[in-house]
Image: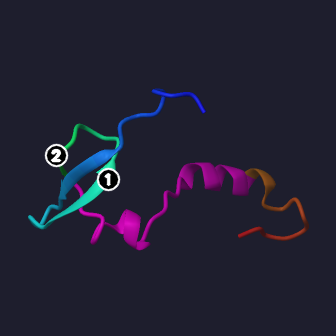
Amino acid sequence: MKKHIHPDYHKITVKMTDGSTYETYSTWGSEGDTMTLDIDPLNHPAWQGGQQGVVERGQLDKFQSKFGGFMGGDAK
């Protein structure tokens, strides 16, 4: 394996939005830096499986009107 090609892996502190902190190892920043999070993964829907989804009604309605009766019946 080649030497000196890997990033520096060091200890940093992560500060959550509620003020709590923990230490972890990362390639981010420098030894002893503090990463302050803007979004808390403990209660954000992206990490908790919350209600998500993007429905573009216009595109779906356009598809339904064009291909809705294709298989002999209403596709809705």
Outermost residue on the right side: it is 72
Q: Position of residue 49 (x, y in %)?
A: 44, 72
Relative height, residue 37 to residue 51 (above, below): above
- Would residue 65 be found to the left or right of residue 58 on screen? right
What colour scheme does the image use?
Answer: rainbow
The answer to whether 56 appears left or right of 44 in the picture is right
Can you identify the residue that label 1 sits on?
A: 25
**Dot 2: element:** loop
- What is the secondary structure assignment of the residue under circle 1? strand
Span highlighted in magenta in the image: 39-65
Q: Quadrant of the C terminus?
A: bottom right
What residue is shown at x 39% (from left), y 72% (from top)?
Answer: 48
Q: Which percent across, then down, holds residue 6?
A: 46, 33
Q: Nearer the viewer, residue 14 or 68?
A: 14
Task: Give the answer, above or below, for where 34 lies relative to 73.
Answer: above
- Residue located 71% across and 52% down the image: 63
Q: Which mark is residue 32?
A: 2
